[in-house]
Amino acid sequence: MRGPRLLRLTIAALHTDAYPPRMEVEVRIRGVRYVEDRDTLALLSGSKDSETDFNERWTFALDGPPSAPWQLVGSASP
């Protein structure tokens, strides 16, 4: 991904009963997104030139140091 811009962030769930506590967020991002073969540089999907909007769901755990307490522990495409 190149040049990502956050368009929207929504807290989808907050799991205060989990240990460590977790938070799930849904994000809408705009940027250039593609997959290429690292050996041949062949384009496998997406576009190297066009921006696109896409959604992600990220899970954070309150398990990091005081300088960065929320740590990314999972991601998925909804």
Image: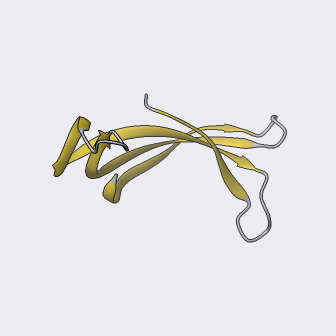
Quadrant of residue 53 within the rendered picture: top left
* Labels in figure, total: 0
Query: Image height check: is 25 above or below 68?
Result: above
Nearest the camera: 6 or 48?
Answer: 48
x and y, in percent, of residue 67 in the image: 73, 71
Nearest the camera: 49 or 30?
Answer: 49
| Residue at x 29%, y 42% (from the top left corner) | 40
Which quarter shows the C terminus?
Answer: top left
Residue extending farthest left: 50
Residue extending farthest right: 19
x and y, in percent, of residue 38 in the image: 37, 44
x and y, in percent, of residue 43 in the image: 23, 39
Query: Image height check: is 49 above or below 11?
Result: below
| Residue at x 43%, y 39% (from the top left corner) | 56
| Residue at x 71%, y 41% (from the top left corner) | 22
Horizontal side, residue 51 vs residue 33: left or right: left
Horizontal side, residue 10 vs residue 19: left or right: left
Q: How is the image coloured?
A: secondary structure
| Residue at x 81%, y 35% (from the top left corner) | 18
Horizontal side, residue 63 vs residue 71: left or right: right
Nearest the camera: 1 or 62?
Answer: 1
x and y, in percent, of residue 9 in the image: 44, 50
Residue extending farthest top: 78
Nearest the camera: 11 or 5?
Answer: 5
Residue extending farthest bottom: 67
